[in-house]
Amino acid sequence: MKRASILAVAAVLAVPGHSRADTNDQLAAKVIALVEVGASVVEANRNDCNAMGDTLSRMVADNAAFIDDVRARSEKITPSEMRTLTARYQSRVEAAMAKAKPGLDRCKSNAKVAAVLRKLGQ
C-alpha cells in the first residue's frame, strides 16, 4: 500500500501523548502504532461499513491537529530519513495493511468511508 495510504489510516486515530517536540522517529513510532490500531478498527467493522465510516470520521475530526502535523512533517523529511523510517517499520505496516485490506476493499465505496478517504487525500 502507498505511503499516503499508510498515513491516511494512521492519521484517523487517537494520538495519546503527541507533542510537536517529538523526533521524527518518535512520531513514526506513534504513526505505526496507530496504523496497527486502525487496522483493528477496520477489521472490527468490516461487516458494517456505515459504522466503519462513522468511527473513522469521528477520529479524523478529533485528531485534525495531529493529521496536519504528520502531513507537514512528512513533507519536510529527507528521502534518506524516509527510507530509514520506512525500513524500520515496514514489516509492521505490511502486517497491519494486510489485516485492514479485506475491510477497506469491502467498504471503500461506502459513502461514509469514501468521504473519510477523500478527506485524507485518497
Image (spheres, helix red, strand yellow):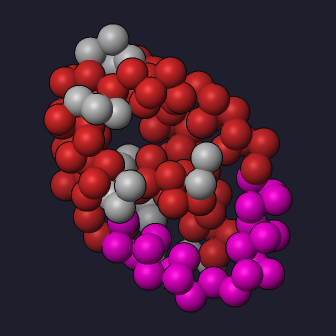
Determine if the magenta segment contains residue 54: no
Q: Is residue 26 left or right of residue 73?
A: right
Quarter of the image where one finds residue 114:
top left
Q: Is residue 5 left or right of residue 59?
A: right
Q: Is residue 91 left or right of residue 27?
A: right
Residue 53 seen in render:
no
Give the vertical position of 58 relative to 107 (above or below). below
In the rendered image, residue 68, in percent from the top left (x then y), is placed at 35, 73
In the rendered image, residue 74, in percent from the top left (x then y), is placed at 54, 76
User: Which of 20/59 is in front?
Assistant: 59
Residue ID at (54%, 52%) = 6
Range drawn in magenta: 67-89
In the rendered image, residue 107, in percent from the top left (x then y), is placed at 33, 26
User: Which of 33/81 is in front?
Assistant: 81
Q: Main secondary structure of the magenta part?
A: helix
Give the vertical position of 38 relative to 67 (above or below). above
In the rendered image, residue 88, in percent from the top left (x then y), is placed at 81, 57
- Circle count: 0
Residue ID at (44%, 65%) = 18
In the rendered image, the residue lying farthest to the front is: 109
Residue 65 seen in render:
yes
Determine if the magenta segment contains residue 72: yes
Give the vertical position of 96 relative to 99 (above or below). below
Residue ID at (63%, 29%) = 98
Residue ID at (26%, 64%) = 64
Give the vertical position of 15 relative to 74 (above or below). above
Quarter of the image where one finds residue 44:
top left
User: Which of 84/27 is in front?
Assistant: 84
* Quadrant location, the C terminus: bottom left
